[in-house]
Image (cartoon, rainbow, N blue to C red):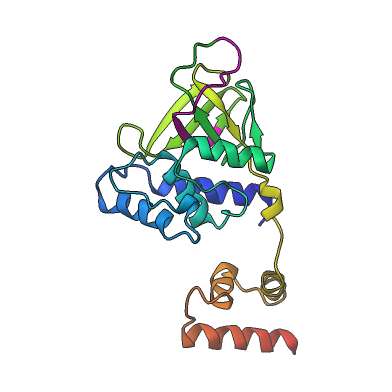
């Protein structure tokens, strides 16, 4: 995957949660995804009754396989602290983010200069239109996963976490091998075989036979 594809993967996973409301089984699954993290950040196990905006962004990052570059925390303040340590915090309300960046808010922002108060909320940038309009997916927005729209440099923007997704845009040897095989033999479902190689799913006997038949034919 290249950087754009990784960013889109994060956004797509966030989109699958749209409409999930607090107290539902899907909401509990978001919290569970966070609580299954080892080690658990600060040793704190999130309760189903806790505020869960940061838990949501963390769960999406975990599901997308980018937890190594996206801060994982249930606290907005801790997200900023971790981002500052990683050099990915942008203290600029007028910054134009990219899809899959995180946006943090401070509802007490007085609109004068860049807000530096304690953050109250966080979301995932879904898209940026004409470099001005942001569409954001947020957990715990009106007790659900919901979209918010606002313009760049809006009041209440605390800042942005801009993970280095380019770092994740590398191919491991298994992926390179499978992608080369796909190119050589015309296989149409590389993601399926990558998942098989990584032990994430089991291949059916029919699909194994089909792969071997195509591969042997390509070698002739």
Percent across and percent down for residue 120 are 44, 29
Compared with 105, 82 (above or below) is below
x 49%, y 11%: residue: 110
115 part of magenta stretch: yes
Percent across and percent down for residue 19 are 32, 42
Percent across and percent down for residue 72 are 52, 48
Image check: 27 left or right of 39?
A: left
Q: Nearer the viewer, residue 206 or 161?
A: 161
Compared with 209, 24 (above or below) is above
27 part of magenta stretch: no
x 54%, y 40%: residue: 79
Quarter of the figure with the C terminus: bottom right
Compared with 194, 34 (above or below) is above
Q: Nearer the viewer, residue 150 or 31?
A: 31
> Tag count in the figure?
0
Residue extending furthest toward the front: 43
Residue extending furthest toward the left: 23
Q: Nearer the viewer, residue 129 or 22?
A: 22
User: Toward which corner of the image does residue 21 lie, by quadrant?
Assistant: top left
x 42%, y 29%: residue: 148
Percent across and percent down for residue 85 are 66, 41
Q: Nearer the viewer, residue 177 or 14?
A: 14
Image check: 19 left or right of 6?
A: left
Quarter of the figure with the N terminus: bottom right
x 40%, y 49%: residue: 16
Span shown in magenta: 112-127
Image check: 140 left or right of 99?
A: left
């Amino acid at each position: 995957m290249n950087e754009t594809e990784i960013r889109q993967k994060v956004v797509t996973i966030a989109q699958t949660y749209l409409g999930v409301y607090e107290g539902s089984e899907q909401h509990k699954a978001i919290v569970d995804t966070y609580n299954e993290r080892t080690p658990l950040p600060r040793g704190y196990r999130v309760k189903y009754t806790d505020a869960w905006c940061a838990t949501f962004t963390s769960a999406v990052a975990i599901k997308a396989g980018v937890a190594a570059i996206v801060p994982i925390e249930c606290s907005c303040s801790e997200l900023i602290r971790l981002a500052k340590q990683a050099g990915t915090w942008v203290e600029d309300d007028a910054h134009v983010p990219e899809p899959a960046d995180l946006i943090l808010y401070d509802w007490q922002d007085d609109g004068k200069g860049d807000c530096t108060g304690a953050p109250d909320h966080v979301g995932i940038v879904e898209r940026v239109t004409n470099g001005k309009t942001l569409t954001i997916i947020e957990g715990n927005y009106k007790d659900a996963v919901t979209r918010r729209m606002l313009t760049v440099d809006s009041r209440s923007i605390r800042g942005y976490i801009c993970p280095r997704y380019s770092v994740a845009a590398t191919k491991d040897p298994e992926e390179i091998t499978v992608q080369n095989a796909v190119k050589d033999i015309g296989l149409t479902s590389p993601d399926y075989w990558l998942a098989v190689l990584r032990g994430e799913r089991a291949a059916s006997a029919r699909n194994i036979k089909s792969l071997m038949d195509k591969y042997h034919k390509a070698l002739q």
